[in-house]
Image: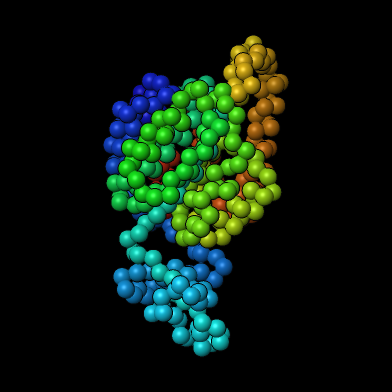
Amino acid sequence: MNPLLSPTSPELNDSDFALLAHYAKHLGRASSAARFTLKSGEKRSKKKGHGMEMLELRPYQTSDDLRHIDWRVTARTGHTHTRLYAQENDHQRILLLDLSPDAYFSTRYAFISTRFIQLAGLIAWRSEQQGDKLLYNLSFGGQSLEHLNKSSVWGMISQLKNASKTSNRNRQATSDLGWYGSKVTSKARNKDIIILTDKQHWDAKQQTALQQLAKHNQIHWVQIFDHHSFELPPGQYQFADAMGTTSVKISKKSSEQAKKDFFEQNATMRQRLAKIGIRHQLFDISEPPEGIARYLLNQGALR
């Protein structure tokens, strides 16, 4: 069996992440990576200057370079405007990984948390191999860790190894999702943002923050679930979570209701995301992580 599809343990080690580096290198390339159109008057220019690419046209600020004043727009509007540029080879993306205690469970192949962490590892390695800058926020086990600067890929992997520990399911999840109140996303512009989470609920304030983030960035939302969890044979089961160990009786009726509730909640979530232009993709645990990474590659989230 594919060692990525079904690792020997849900708690990943250095050899597991080293294997991910090999798969990341051989993902191939997208035939035509889709880029996004910015909103709120921002645009990418086909004309290049100073070895740079125009990102935004905005009212002049005292800290702006005088050489980048757009005199045509200034003359037309009567107000000084400046062009903002970014280096053409400055490819940056943001990864937000947010795991609830429920993610540390699955009926086969791997824990949902493990699959998310494998995918995060592939994204980290691919960014490293392509020389791209990767900023990230990792939320798991009641803690939130973020990195604002490019660092060694093994530094991030060390944190991902901690995220894979099954003891994290015994801790309460953070109330805020990765994009809310995060320094990583507070000033994000023209970035590919990849959100990996099993969570389906957030409040109105978090929705407003997400909408603002989506105005200036392309957000790729990946969700993983285990459809076999709705097909467990009727019986008595022991489940452990942040509140302790509980005994749960599962019947055919309760499984059908749980499946109905999940997909109704998922449909509501997808509608909320679609309204603000966020791409959402739901994968089953049977999908190997390199398959999900290729999806992101074809969507332009990776290169």
Say how many tags the image has: 0
Q: Residue placed at 53% from the left, 35% from the top?
A: 143
Q: Nearer the viewer, residue 266 or 74?
A: 74
Q: Nearer the viewer, residue 111 or 62?
A: 62
Residue 52 to residue 80: above or below:
above
Residue extending farthest front: 62
Left or right: 158 in relation to 284: left
Q: Residue placed at 43% from the left, 45% from the top?
A: 147
Q: Nearer the viewer, residue 10 or 249?
A: 10
Q: Residue placed at 34% from the left, 45% from the top?
A: 151
Residue 274 to residue 51: above or below:
above
Whole-percent x, y for residue 227 in the image: 56, 28
Q: Nearer the viewer, residue 244 or 24?
A: 244
Whole-percent x, y for residue 138 in the image: 48, 39
Image quadrant where one finds the N terminus: top left
Whole-percent x, y for residue 204 in the image: 69, 49
Rendered image quadrant of residue 33? bottom left
Can residue 207 be seen here? The reply is yes
Display colour scheme: rainbow
Q: Residue placed at 35% from the left, 73% from the top?
A: 48
Can residue 234 be seen here? The reply is no
Whole-percent x, y for residue 23 in the image: 31, 37
Residue extending farthest top: 236
